[in-house]
Image (cartoon, rainbow, N blue to C red):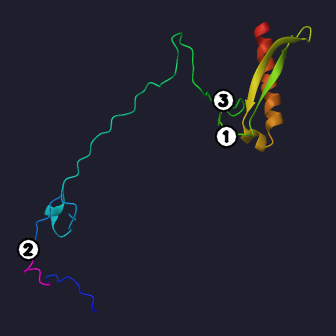
C-alpha cells in the first residue's frame, strides 16, 4: 500500500489567495511590504497603590499572623526558614546595684551573621551600644 498525500495546488495562481490582516493569527510582517506593519499601541499600566495593607482590629492593634524579625546587626529581614538565626535576650542590670531589673533587651541575629563567624562580635557591640545609650539617658 502506498501512502497517499493530499494534493495541493502547486501553482499559486490556481489557488485563491486570502488577504492577510493584522487580526488574522497567521498574519506575518513582511519587510518587503511596509503596508503589513501595523502601528504599535502602548497602554499605560496604572501604578500600584501607595498604601500598605495591614491587618488591624478595631482597637488599631496589629493582628498579622506572621511579622518577620529583623537582624539587629545587619537590619536584614530574618526569613521564616532561616534556621541559623537566634534571638538572645540580654538582661538589663541596674548600674548602681548591679542587680537584674526584671527587664531584658532582645537582640536578633540572622543566620548569615553567625555563618560568617561574626555573631560574638556583633552581640558584644550591640550590648555595648545599648549600655552606652542606657547610661547616657540616666545622666
CA gap between label 1 and label 2 equals: 65 Å
| Rendered image quadrant of residue 8 | bottom left
Task: Point out the frontmost of discs 1 and 3.
Answer: 1
Tag count in the figure? Answer: 3
In this figure, which residue is indicated by the disc labeled 2? 16
Question: Counting other residues with Cα less than 10 Å from the Cα at mark 2, is it few (<14), some (14-19), or many (20 or more)?
Answer: few
> Which quadrant: the N terminus?
bottom left
CA gap between label 1 and label 3 equals: 12 Å
In this figure, which residue is indicated by the disc labeled 1? 81
Q: Position of residue 61 (x, y in %)?
A: 57, 14
Callout 1: SS: loop
The magenta segment:
10-15
Which disc, if any, is residue 69?
3
**Most common SS among magenta residues:** loop
> Which quadrant: the C terminus?
top right
Q: Earlier in the sequence, mark 1 or mark 2?
A: 2
Q: Give the residue drawn at x 57%, y 20%.
A: 63
Q: Where is 76 relative to 9, above or below?
A: above
Q: Where is 117 relative to 35, above or below?
A: above
Q: Give the residue drawn at x 54%, y 9%.
A: 59
Q: Give the residue drawn at x 65%, y 36%.
A: 80
Q: With 90 as the anchor, is 46 left or right in this view? A: left
Q: Position of residue 85 (x, y in %)?
A: 74, 36
Callout 3: SS: strand
Q: Earlier in the sequence, mark 3 or mark 2?
A: 2
| Rendered image quadrant of residue 47 | top left
CA gap between label 3 and label 2 equals: 70 Å
Amino acid at each position: 500500500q502506498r501512502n497517499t498525500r493530499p494534493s495541493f495546488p502547486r501553482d499559486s495562481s490556481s489557488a485563491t489567495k486570502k488577504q492577510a490582516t493584522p487580526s488574522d493569527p497567521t498574519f506575518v510582517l513582511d519587510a518587503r511590504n511596509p503596508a503589513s506593519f501595523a502601528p504599535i499601541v502602548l497602554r499605560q499600566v496604572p501604578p500600584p497603590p501607595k498604601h500598605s495593607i495591614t491587618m488591624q482590629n478595631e482597637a488599631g492593634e496589629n493582628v498579622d499572623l506572621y511579622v518577620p524579625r529583623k537582624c539587629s546587626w545587619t537590619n536584614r529581614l530574618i526569613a521564616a526558614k532561616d534556621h541559623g538565626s537566634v534571638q538572645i535576650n540580654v538582661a538589663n542590670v541596674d548600674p548602681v546595684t548591679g542587680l537584674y531589673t526584671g527587664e531584658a533587651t532582645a537582640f536578633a541575629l540572622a543566620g548569615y551573621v553567625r555563618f560568617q563567624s561574626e555573631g560574638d562580635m556583633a552581640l558584644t557591640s550591640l550590648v555595648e551600644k545599648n549600655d552606652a545609650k542606657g547610661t547616657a539617658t540616666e545622666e
